[in-house]
Image: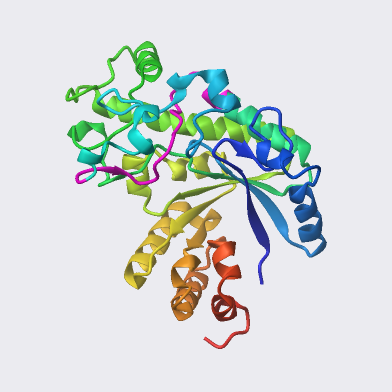
Amino acid sequence: GASDLFVQVYRGGRAWYAARLADDAPYRALGGEDPLRELVRRAQARGLRVHAWVNVLTLGSHRDGPLLRALGPGAVQVDREGRSMLDYPGLQVPEDEQRWVRVGTPGVWLDPGTPALAERLAAVFAELLVGYPELDGLHLDYIRYPDVLPFVPGARFDVGLDFGFGDSSRMRFRAETGLEAPFGRDSRNAEAFDEWRRARVTEVVGAISKAARHARPGIAVSAAVWAFPTRAYLSLYQDWTRWLSDGALDFAVPMAYSRDPRLFSLMARTSLAAGGARTWIGLGAWLFDEAPEGAAAQLREARALSPGGIALFSWDALAASPGLVAALAPGTPK
């Protein structure tokens, strides 16, 4: 019953396709095979649309590569204490701090406030779409600031672990606003800096969307987003409802991933109310490999809400769990 495939082709700055602007070592290691082109051919022969899924602002554990060589280490996120993520031991906050704070997704994250970063990323993904014009969509993931635990509600409260304080971003903020970015325990101008950081993520989305549509007219641009829009807005500087209203995205996929049925319902209904008909509800199917009936119940509820679409995350979990596939298949008694 599927209609679309979201196929991860760019992760950690590495490309599983032929590229000049990204590290395509994974593609070259295949020795001449091109699985993406073959997948698109086979999928479209069966009436399936294919979206290239790309991790935008995280490089994972990849400390090198064309992007950082071009922009330099200053493009990497710096926390409020002035520490670059490149200097984190094991790409995680120091062990003596982990009792209090953690990066939700550890790794090397790019700072969207870095000058020229938006244009560079737009060029990376335009190259992908020019090389594979058969693609139906471009799906943006990790298009936000790093998530931290516990969540930080912006810089104005002067608490927790927060990012975006590198020299280049602070200088750019000063040049564009005439204000000093808050730093250390100084919370002055915090709300203005939060809004500026939010605008920088929006700038990256807009640049990628514009370049994608120029490279491949008619392409569908989408993004995986945090399911609670207020948390996304305050803590991740991800203003995804604006991206929809401004037309930068064709649809958004809020990640309503939870085993808790009440929490799932809250995330699904809240995100749908915020994003409207161009919202695809993301189900965490992998959470139910041992309890398929839970995934089936969430699928029924999501369908009853009549969203623009429903996305099941992820294929590998389905492939490993025949019971999960059977529970989600059309026509299965529920």
In the rendered view of the protein, which quadrant contains the N terminus?
bottom right
User: Residue at horizontal 35%, vertical 46%?
Assistant: 104
Is 276 located above or below residue 174 in the figure?
A: below
Left or right: 102 with respect to 118?
A: left
Q: Is residue 236 left or right of residue 34?
A: left
| Count of marks overlaid on the render | 0
Is residue 199 rendered magenta in the image?
A: no
Q: Relative to the observer, which residue lies in front, 194 or 33?
A: 33
Give left or right: position of 138 versus 73: right
Magenta stretch holds residue 102: yes
- Residue 247 against residue 4 in the figure, above or below: above
Q: Is residue 121 above or below residue 4?
A: above
287 sits to left or right of 56: left
- What residue sits 44% from the left and 34% below the top? 108
The answer to whether residue 138 is visible is yes
Q: Which residue corresponds to the image point at 37% horizontal and 13% vertical from the top-left? A: 171
User: What residue span does the magenta drawing correspond to?
Assistant: 99-119
From where the camera sits, is residue 17 visible? Answer: no
- At x 21%, y 32%, the residue is 156
